[in-house]
Amino acid sequence: MAKTKSKWVCQSCGYQNASYLGRCPECGQFGTFVEETVSVKIESSKPSNIISQCKISKIKEIELDEKIRFKTSINELNRVLGGGFVQGSLILLAGDPGIGKSTLVLQTTKSVCEQKLDDKNLKVLYICAEESPLQVKLRAKRLDVEPDSLYLTNQTCIDEVITQIESIKPDFLIVDSIQSVFCANIASSAGSVSQIRECTNVLMRIAKQKNITTIIIGHVTKEGNIAGPKVLEHMVDCVINFEGDKYKHYRILRCIKNRFGTISEVGVFKMEDDGLIEIASPAQMLLDEPQNAPGSAITATMEGSRVLLHEIQALVGSTNYTNPRRVAVGLEYNRLLQVLAVLEKKVGLNLSKQDVYVNVVGGIDIIEPSYDLALALAIISSIRDIPISNKTIIIGEVGLLGEIRYVDNIERRLKEAQKLGFKKAIIPKVSDKISKKISDINLEIKQVSKLTDAIIQGLKQD
């Protein structure tokens, strides 16, 4: 029998140590070390057989054809992937529980099974490691996904999965989820760092050697990071995050790594009873009946090559406590603190006795800083109890000196606002070249360079 030994592994970053540590020296997390028993001699013939099939080729001898990438009927997914799935690629799909990861991949299988290769429909093997095939069948029936070339199995041992792959010879493989699959040669439980790393490594070898497009579904931690070792994200070809509030309708598919395309594109979906519905023009959908009331302002942000319009709401009220509350939902908390500091220093507002609550309507998080000016005006509007017209679009980044800084793609944002019926726009000062481009846009455009000027224009009653 092979000798065994134990090691302590951080479940957050994968750092290994011979003894227990209360705090991980690599990632700084407390209480994350778990003891794992490993064999000194690991006997695994099947992965080695896969490696032995490798051969050396000259790069000029490798031929590319049109079949190397295939699209699905879900255009939003094609957009995020850079034009569709690449054969032999390994894709990691991560997201919060209940966000719709399994629903998305199950709807994808219907389109994949309709694709043909050498006059045969593509075969899909679905490893439902967290559910029984009967449970997946119930969801598939609700989604109207029942193709003939879709195979289900609830096998969780990676060695048995390899056997089934060699038997069925699928063109497309889905593992739901990687935290539930285990390798028998590793003594630790499924979901540990060692198990995730080893199982992903085996799946990566299979995908490359047998040219099988593989999607592995991963869980996320309470901080929103992908569970498992960080090396997991380096091993895969594409990392996709499925974001959104599971209690609301809208979902955003965001690519944070892609070896075969850009990472600047996003896909927008709406969750309905019969599955995920893609939204080709999400600007109007996210702008759900903007309020013409104090504390509401509308801004335009860029997600990849698409313009999204958001309504930012602010509520400012007095407090009797020593430390006033600052609550930000849908935008960065530190960004809110920075805007409040600028308002106090450059505008003269005293917010030391005021609670400030801000919210982005629709449940979609905003990342880029172009919403600063709309946030500042929404706060001012709530304090002064003066509404901002819901036909006014506000775009700009607020600097620490109270200046309004330029943001990219201002022309595209204004054109989208014009299409949706806006009448007025408050934007930063732009160059003469850009001024000529936006002169044809049918909007009353007010260019401002200081926060005080923007406040005057935003609260000005028509």
Image: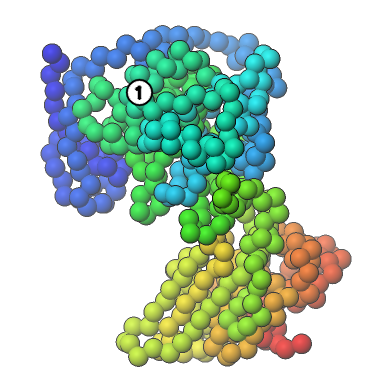
Residue 6 image point, x, y percent: 14, 30
The image quadrant that residue 451 belongs to is bottom right
> According to the image, label 1 marks what residue?
158
Q: On the image, which quarter does residue 407 sit in?
A: bottom right
Work out whether residue 447 can be spotted: no
Image quadrant holding the C terminus, namely bottom right
Q: Is residue 319 left or right of residue 437?
A: left
User: x, y percentage for residue 68?
Assistant: 64, 23
- 216 lies above or below 362: above
Identify the image quadrant of the N terminus.
top left
Q: Amino acid at mark 1?
A: Ile
Against 281, residue 68 (above or below) is above
Report the front residue among 370 and 242.
242
Instruction: State the residue at coordinates (49%, 43%).
Output: 101
Residue 456 at x, y percent in the picture: 67, 86
Task: Label 1, secondary structure: give it.
Answer: helix
In the depicted structure, whether residue 92 falls above or below residue 253? above
Which sits in the foreground, 299 or 18?
299
Residue 3 image position (x, y, % from top left): 12, 19
Report the side of 359 relative to 392 (left or right): left
